[in-house]
Amino acid sequence: MSDDTAPPLSGLVVLDMSQFLSGPYCSLRLLDLGARVIKVERPDGGDLSRRLYLSDTEIGGDSTIFHAINRGKESFAADLKDAADMAALKSLIAKADVLIQNFRPGVIERLGLDYARVKEINPRLVYASISGYGEEGPWVKRPGQDLLAQARSGVMWLNGDEDQGPVPFGLAVADMLAGAAACQGILAALVRRGVTGKGGLVETSLLEALVDFQFEVLTTHLNDSRRLPRRSSFRSAHAYLSAPYGVYPAEDGFLALAMTPIPKLAPLLGLDVELAGYADDPSSWFSARDDIKAIIAKRIATQPVDHWLSILEPADIWCAKVLTWPELMEHDGFRLLDMLQTVTRDDDVSIETTRSPLRIDGRRGKAGSAAPRIGEHSDRIRAEFDL
């Protein structure tokens, strides 16, 4: 591959000593940008997410989530309690560009692989550390797990209807966001290294990523007499947005309506009379949003989704059909993005998964190989790096 077509991180070596989701998600993004990712795993069981099952499906002895987040990586097995393996790992660190770890605070120091000591081995190394709640304070020794971080962050009070209590996200959103934040920091530190020749320490946590995720609404809270958000009691979709913002059941599915002035929407839905009392009072679109949304919901339920789209979309109303995964994947809007790929391994493992969300110079990267077996590449890596 020529220099002008190579991915931007080609030639960089990333050592991923992390487990579960946050660190591996970070290294996956770096891999998709062209970096070589060597996953450092325990010989006896490897990354714990190999056995983190989202369903009763496993492929090649590992969970689908492990395959999804570790495609294209190499596996180097090392027992960190073994002196020879530790010496080999330190030799590998000396030749790497990036190291990622998400051990509980204190563990990496006991292993002697904290940044203060590792930078003596490799001053050019960019070292990324992801924790649950930072490096100090009363939560440091608490499990840095996604649901628990969501619980402590306040984000659950933004989901669902007002009478539902706290509602967690149906995704490991803290892990994903912390991994993405770490990736941004790593890329910035690599740019600086290109200027100064020196590496650096990048730190983030699940809690910090979730606080940042809420920056828009937290800023409103902090500058609005610190009033707590109040979710709509009916078809809520955003605690701080007025009617009609929400998702409504139609005759054959669901319709999402975003920010739209009530006077513009009312005649299109045939609700001029029913919504007349709210049309000239924008403040009521928030204060009376439950009542307004109930009127809208009753009308939308009388017709199929496509009926409403045929009326609303030509009028430039922000709306969309709520798609299931099969409907998404059958739609040309998704197919043209070409975001799925099949990755394989030499033991007949084959798994369909997603591709990078990024396109560089018009091209989206592909990883042809599936997630590795534990230590699959140890011998080759030892020979290549003279470990």
Image (cartoon, rainbow, N blue to C red):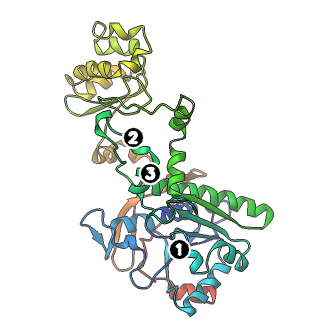
Quadrant of the image occupied by residue 45: bottom left
Q: Is residue 259 above or below residue 359?
A: above
Give left or right: position of 22 versus 298: right
Q: Residues within 10 Å of mark 1 (few under 14, many from 20)?
A: many
Quadrant of the image occupied by residue 66: bottom left
Q: Residue at x 35, y 18 (%)?
A: 288
> Judging from the image, what secondary structure is the residue with disc 3 in?
helix
* Circle 3 residue: 152
Q: Is residue 187 above or below residue 20?
A: above
Q: Nearer the viewer, residue 238 or 317?
A: 238
Inspect the image, locate mark 1, and give the three-letter code of the amino acid beneath it: Met
Q: Nearer the viewer, mark 1 or mark 3?
A: 3
* Circle 1 residue: 17
> Judging from the image, what secondary structure is the residue with disc 2 in?
helix
Q: Nearer the viewer, residue 10 or 142?
A: 142
How far separated are the C-alphas under marks 1 and 3?
A: 26 Å
Inspect the image, locate mark 3, and give the three-letter code of the amino acid beneath it: Arg
How far separated are the C-alphas under marks 3 and 2?
A: 11 Å
Q: Count every numbered label the image shows and give the total.
A: 3
* Circle 2 residue: 157
Q: Residue at x 68, y 80 (%)?
A: 94
For this orientation, the residue located farthest to the right is 196
Q: Give the mark nearest the N terminus, 3 or 2.
A: 3
The answer to whether marks 3 and 2 mark residues whose Cβ atoms lie closer than 8 Å is no
> Judging from the image, what secondary structure is the residue with disc 1 in?
loop
Give left or right: position of 121 versus 13: right
Give left or right: position of 223 versus 173: right
x, y (%) of residue 319?
37, 28
Quadrant of the image occupied by residue 234: top left
